[in-house]
Image: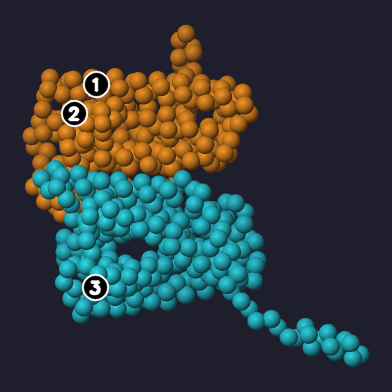
Chain colours: A cyan, B orange
């Protein structure tokens, strides 16, 4: 009697949940998948290099020795990050489904949304490789000098931008789960968002009538903030406004994603539509 | 001989029909058209804005170049995707095991992509006229159409080469995407080939698109047959070389895969 009570008290003593091993394992698998994939290499290295090369050669054709480095080279890096995110986060679920591991993920005690959140974060972190390469190109090949006082601004801008990418990536990952029909248009989402967020040219080039759509994308504000942080004279009021707007819109995307995740949960557990995922 | 030829034609058309039913027949008109127009428009706009940032005075060069690239990318990607798609859907071993001739079987499947590419080009040209004021009043439209058709066909050879890689690697589609991306630099779409460094110019002129795009560009500006004939002939010859090379590469890879038992090896 005494012994069984002792067992009971032990069994009721719950271990405190530590999410770190789960996060680490998810990130580890995701990093390995990306590192071993030629597809990732193409998205992270080849594609940004091609777009930056086009910008560079266009500048040469126009008679300029050096292009607008921030837009052409660093913009190319942002483009790489975006392309990698849009294709990886969006198609992760499809790949799970094809490989037959979606059922295992859904059956595990961790929610699908948590898994997607960690994966998207890893995809964003992997995508930063593209940006790092673009920074290296700008600094080493073109001898671009960044004033020391700009570095904190650049660092914060990068964090804001990555948060925006994470939110939009998470939204896209859930969107894919809600309706499989999105698979057709996602291939064509890459360039329009790159234009609307003005990765590779100043935002002022966009016509006014489309600005409402551009303004609703958090990374557009993040990119503007990053571009401003490279300027020799930083207007701190404007840059704070860009960061604030980017974070605000990103949070809105997170709220929408939360409702999408509830819909996904219902689809899987209430109406039993796992196969539609 | 005639019986064999008619059999090959029947196989070619049957293959095209299956491909159409698998990839296009189920699509709805609205989404199909919007997707077809969205991509070329986005591509044109991106490079146009980049050109403006660089300080280019003639944005139409970029617009027209990107329109003319469409049939070529459809040809390359279409044929390559046809073969790698068979691998993805696990039907490649059945096709390899069948006695059907490889040429009509796979090139037939690419026919719909060629036709699709032609539709994309017409749509993009309309967009060019509407949004970017491309002037077609002085264009030699018959020659332009011929050049576009030629581009669609000659680019299939490169697609066949890249698609053949599907027999030996899972990443054939990725490689095709990367090569297609290189066209933005190498094929004279966004800037003349002369802007490129010498070694890239040599690569550019060894591709089956560069001359065809240049010829189509001249035809759009109103050039007659005599002035574009060398370019067209060059495009045709180089396209044929790629098609023949692609065919033999496929046969070689197939034989190698059967010998070492490594179809879909990776």
Name the residue rendered at 11%, 51% in the picture: B55
Q: CA distance from mark 3 to mark 1?
A: 57 Å
Q: Secondary structure at mark 3?
A: helix
- Residue hosting label 1: B234
Between B100 and A61, the residue placed more toward the observer is: A61
Q: Percent x, y for residue B7?
A: 49, 18
* Image marks 1 and 2: residues in contact by CB distance under 8 Å: no
Dividing the picture into quarters, in which one does residue A86 lie? bottom left
Task: Decide if residue B116 is in sight here.
Answer: no
Q: Are marks 1 and 2 on the same chain?
A: yes
In whole angstroms, how far apart are the C-alphas of marks 3 and 2?
53 Å
Q: Chain under label 1?
A: B
**Which residue lies most toward the bottom here?**
A2
In this view, the mark in front (3 or 2):
3
Dot in front, 3 or 1 = 3
- Tell me if mark 1 has few (under 14), some (14-19) or many (20+) residues whose alpha carbon lies within 10 angstroms of its own: some
Mark 3 and mark 1 on one chain: no
Residue A149's mark?
3
Q: Are marks 3 and 2 in contact (CB under 8 Å)?
A: no
Residue to which mark 2 is pinned: B215
Q: Secondary structure at mark 1?
A: helix
């Amino acid at each position: 009697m005494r012994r069984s009570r002792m067992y009971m008290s032990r069994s009721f003593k719950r271990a405190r949940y530590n999410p770190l091993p789960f996060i680490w394992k998810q990130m580890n698998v995701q990093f390995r998948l990306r590192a071993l994939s030629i597809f990732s290499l193409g998205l992270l290295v080849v594609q940004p290099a091609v777009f930056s090369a086009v910008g560079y050669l266009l500048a040469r054709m126009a008679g300029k020795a050096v292009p607008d480095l921030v837009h052409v080279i660093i913009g190319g890096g942002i483009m790489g990050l975006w392309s990698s995110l849009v294709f990886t986060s969006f198609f992760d679920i499809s790949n799970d489904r094809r490989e037959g591991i979606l059922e295992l993920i859904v059956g595990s005690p961790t929610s699908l949304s948590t898994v997607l959140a960690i994966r998207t974060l890893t995809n964003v972190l992997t995508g930063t490789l593209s940006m790092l390469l673009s920074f290296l190109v700008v600094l080493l090949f073109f001898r671009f000098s960044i004033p020391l006082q700009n570095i904190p601004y650049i660092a914060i801008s990068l964090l804001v931008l990555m948060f925006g990418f994470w939110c939009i990536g998470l939204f896209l990952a859930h969107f894919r789960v809600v309706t499989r029909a999105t698979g057709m248009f996602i291939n064509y989402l890459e360039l329009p968002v790159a234009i609307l967020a003005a990765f590779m040219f100043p935002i002022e080039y966009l016509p006014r009538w489309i600005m409402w759509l551009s303004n609703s994308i958090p990374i557009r504000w993040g990119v503007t903030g990053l571009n401003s942080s490279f300027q020799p004279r930083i207007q701190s009021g404007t840059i704070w406004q860009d960061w604030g707007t980017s974070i605000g819109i990103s949070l809105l995307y997170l709220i929408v994603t939360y409702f999408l995740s509830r819909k996904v949960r219902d689809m899987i557990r209430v109406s039993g539509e796992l196969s539609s995922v | 001989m005639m019986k064999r030829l008619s059999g090959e034609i029947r196989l070619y058309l049957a293959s095209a029909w299956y491909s159409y039913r698998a990839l296009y027949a189920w699509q709805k008109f609205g989404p199909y058209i919007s997707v077809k127009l969205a991509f070329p428009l986005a591509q044109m706009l991106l490079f146009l804005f980049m050109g403006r940032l660089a300080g280019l005075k003639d944005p139409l060069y970029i617009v027209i170049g990107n329109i003319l690239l469409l049939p070529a990318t459809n040809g390359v990607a279409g044929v390559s995707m046809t073969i790698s798609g068979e691998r993805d859907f696990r039907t490649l071993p059945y096709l390899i095991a069948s006695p059907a001739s490889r040429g009509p079987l796979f090139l037939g499947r690419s026919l719909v992509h060629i036709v699709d590419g032609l539709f994309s080009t017409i749509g993009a040209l309309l967009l060019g006229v509407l949004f970017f004021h491309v002037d077609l009043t002085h264009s030699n439209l018959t020659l332009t159409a011929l050049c576009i058709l030629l581009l669609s066909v000659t680019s299939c050879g490169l697609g066949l080469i890249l698609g053949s890689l599907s027999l030996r690697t899972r990443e054939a589609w990725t490689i095709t995407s990367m090569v297609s991306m290189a066209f933005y630099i190498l094929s004279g779409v966004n800037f003349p080939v002369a802007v490129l460094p010498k070694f890239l110019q040599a690569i550019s002129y060894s591709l089956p698109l560069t001359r065809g795009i240049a010829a189509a560009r001249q035809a759009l500006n109103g050039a007659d047959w005599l002035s574009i004939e060398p370019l067209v002939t060059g495009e045709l010859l180089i396209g044929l070389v790629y098609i023949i090379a692609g065919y033999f590469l496929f046969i070689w890879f197939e034989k190698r895969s059967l010998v070492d038992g490594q179809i879909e090896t990776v």
